[in-house]
Image (cartoon, coloured by chain):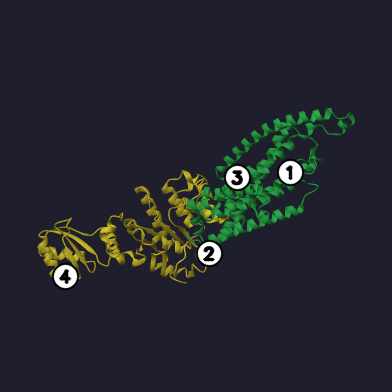
Chain colours: A green, B yellow
């Protein structure tokens, strides 16, 4: 199995879409630096005006606002967008081409004609897709933090904004930078698993079709329809909401809250992930074992 | 242990109403270079796909070294290297990476063998090049190397000379012949290029409409009804003399429309020397006496039973 996973990673590493990923990421970061800079200026202005109106003793108690909007804050802010919008697209690209491309190029037939295990082939591919997503998640998280620190500095205390569950904002508090960094990487790790579950839909479709674009687009449509349904008709789809693929993203924001993680929500999200993993890996296994090539 | 590497027994395979294989049976003896020829749509690729477990027969049995492919595909295909359809590789990977991934070979022994076989097939200098830089001929060589790895005793090549230029065809032909004579491999080759099959193979099977129309050693099959072409003076008298002298041993004798003055004599067995001697003794001047070329093509057209239709398709 390890050899199969290694081979799959070698195949994926040779693809040109890595350049697209890096260019996409660079473009996003450029825009984010600009947006954050504008946000910082506005926030500082308002915070200074607020502080000037307060008694001197209170001014001493409240931390310097310029230190709250630092590079780590930038990283947390950027990664929200990175993992909610950009990474799913990349994940769909990798997962969608996993089996479809091999069918299209004829390499699947060459491989299967040797009598190798088809189940192992599918499982190794899925694990390889996950490892690539994990690699890029960690890489982008580290790069984003680095960019943030270079452009906006680093302070020892961090505001808990963006560290709590979406829709359930507790009052902003302060945590140490160490805890904030830990929560940042835990959230990134969680997000890699979530991306793998989200992209598994494309992975499953790729066993049925010969074109990567069909599989990737199919997964994307499924994801965005779920997202729109969840955001627009949240009350009306209460019964099926826990099973929507977008449910797994809820756990992402939970992971930002180091001190008060809602484990119940995390467990539910992981359970949904497991359902998608199981169905979307088992289906290609069955398809490859019964389909004629 | 069976003397046959591959046996196919009454295999039937249908796609909807179309019956691609209709009770095909054949046996491939060890150490032979076996050719399967047939017109387009005869069922050659379907047969190979069933042999390599890429497709499942509706009925019938396929065994490799006595192991049922349907029941134990992994075990049966262990020593088989097959290239079904055109050779397919990962274009962005090097030839070496392609060989490693598609053969799943590992270890020192495998690496030594990979280098030796690459040397043998003439691609050793290209192992570190990406496959997208390869010509079709180079891909065929790489495919043959892959088929031999990690340690195949039975090599299946589907239309290996398809799309190659004349030099490439000669190279691949030589390589395939050497697989049998030098490496002792059993090779199964399919083609609709009859001339190639005739030059490469020691045994053949003719597949038509999903059935094996004939099979056996090449010489035996071609000897079934040898044809001698004779150019002699007074062909009408010569024809009468031969009919009278050889009687039922001559199956047919005529002057082809496209070669007037030439007698085309189809006999039960090889007897060109006797024909010549008879004519010369009776005072005929024989200016040409030769076995009819393209014997395989003739046999193929006869067996497939659609001479005029197939002639256009067959490239010899």
Tell me which chain the residue with mark 3 is part of.
A
Tell me which chain the residue with mark 4 is part of.
B
In this rendering, position of residue B53 left or right of residue B290: right
Tell me which chain the residue with mark 2 is part of.
B
Badge 1 is on which residue?
A: A184
Nearest the eye: B173 or B82: B82
Badge 3 is on which residue?
A: A90
Which residue shows up at 31% across the image and 67% down it?
B220
In this rendering, position of residue B207 left or right of residue A106: left
Q: What's the CA distance linking mark 1 and mark 4? A: 98 Å
Residue B215 visible from this viewpoint: no
Are tags 1 and 4 found on a single chain? Answer: no
The location of residue A51, given as percent across then percent down, is: 83, 30
**Mark closer to the chain start, 4 or 2:** 2
**Numbered mark located on residue B246 in the image:** 4
**Mark closer to the chain start, 3 or 1:** 3
Q: Quadrant of residue A278?
A: bottom right
Are tags 3 and 2 found on a single chain? Answer: no
Neighbours of disc 4 within 10 Å: few (<14), some (14-19), many (20+):
some
Tell me which chain the residue with mark 1 is part of.
A
Asked whether the beta carbons under mark 4 and mark 2 sit within 8 Å of each other, the answer is no
Neighbours of disc 1 within 10 Å: few (<14), some (14-19), many (20+):
many
The location of residue B218, given as percent across then percent down, is: 33, 64
Mark 4 or 3: the one toward you: 3
Badge 2 is on which residue?
A: B74
């Amino acid at each position: 199995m390890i050899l199969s996973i290694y081979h799959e990673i070698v195949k994926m590493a040779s693809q040109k879409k890595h350049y697209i990923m890096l260019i996409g990421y660079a473009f996003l970061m450029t825009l984010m630096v600009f947006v954050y800079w504008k946000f910082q200026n506005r926030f500082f202005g308002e915070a200074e005006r607020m502080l000037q109106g307060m008694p001197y003793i209170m001014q001493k108690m409240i931390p310097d606002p310029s230190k709250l909007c630092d590079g780590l804050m930038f990283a947390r802010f950027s990664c929200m967008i990175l993992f909610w919008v950009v990474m799913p697209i990349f994940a769909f690209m990798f997962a969608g081409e996993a089996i479809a491309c091999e069918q299209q190029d004829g390499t699947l037939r060459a491989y299967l004609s040797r009598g190798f295990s088809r189940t192992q082939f599918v499982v190794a591919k899925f694990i390889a897709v996950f490892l690539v997503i994990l690699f890029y998640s960690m890489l982008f998280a580290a790069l984003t933090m680095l960019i943030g620190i270079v452009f906006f500095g680093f302070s020892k205390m961090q505001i808990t904004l963006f560290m709590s569950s979406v829709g359930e904002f507790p009052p902003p508090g302060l945590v140490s930078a160490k805890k904030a960094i830990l929560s940042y990487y835990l959230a990134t790790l969680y997000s890699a698993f979530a991306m793998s579950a989200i992209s598994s839909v494309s992975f499953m479709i790729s066993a049925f079709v010969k074109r990567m674009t069909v599989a990737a687009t199919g997964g994307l449509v499924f994801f965005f329809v779920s997202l729109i349904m969840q955001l627009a008709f949240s009350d009306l789809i209460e019964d099926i909401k826990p099973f929507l693929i977008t449910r797994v993203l809820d756990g992402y924001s939970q992971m930002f809250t180091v001190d008060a993680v809602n484990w119940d929500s995390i467990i539910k999200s992981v359970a949904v992930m497991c359902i998608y993993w199981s169905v979307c890996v088992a289906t290609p296994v069955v398809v490859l074992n019964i389909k004629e090539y | 242990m069976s003397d046959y590497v591959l046996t196919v027994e009454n295999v039937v395979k249908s796609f909807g109403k179309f019956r691609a294989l209709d009770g095909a049976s054949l046996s491939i003896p060890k150490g032979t270079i076996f050719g399967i020829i047939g017109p387009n749509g005869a069922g050659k690729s379907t047969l190979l796909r069933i042999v390599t477990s890429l497709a499942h027969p509706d009925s019938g049995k396929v065994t490799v070294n006595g192991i049922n492919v349907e029941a134990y595909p992994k075990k049966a295909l262990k020593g088989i290297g097959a290239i079904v359809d055109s050779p397919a590789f990962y274009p962005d990977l090097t030839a070496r990476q392609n060989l490693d991934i598609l053969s799943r070979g590992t270890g020192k022994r495998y690496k030594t063998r990979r280098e030796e076989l690459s040397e043998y097939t003439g691609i050793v200098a290209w192992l570190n090049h990406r496959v997208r830089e390869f010509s079709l001929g180079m891909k065929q060589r790489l495919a043959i190397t892959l088929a031999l790895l990690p340690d195949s005793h039975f090599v299946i090549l589907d239309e290996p000379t398809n799309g190659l230029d004349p030099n490439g065809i000669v190279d691949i032909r030589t390589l395939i012949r050497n697989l049998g004579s030098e490496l002792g491999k059993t090779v199964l080759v399919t083609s609709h290029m009859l001339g190639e099959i005739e030059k490469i193979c020691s045994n053949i099977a003719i597949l038509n409409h999903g059935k094996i129309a004939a099979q056996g050693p090449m010489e035996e099959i071609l000897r079934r009804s040898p044809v001698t072409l004779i150019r002699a003076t007074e062909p009408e008298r010569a024809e009468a003399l031969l009919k009278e002298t050889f009687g039922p041993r001559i199956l047919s004798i005529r002057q082809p429309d496209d070669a007037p003055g030439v007698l085309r004599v189809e006999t039960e067995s090889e007897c060109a020397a006797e024909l010549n001697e008879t004519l010369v003794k009776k005072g005929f001047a024989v200016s040409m006496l030769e076995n009819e070329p393209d014997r395989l093509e003739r046999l193929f057209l006869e067996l497939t039973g659609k001479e005029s239709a197939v002639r256009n398709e067959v490239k010899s």
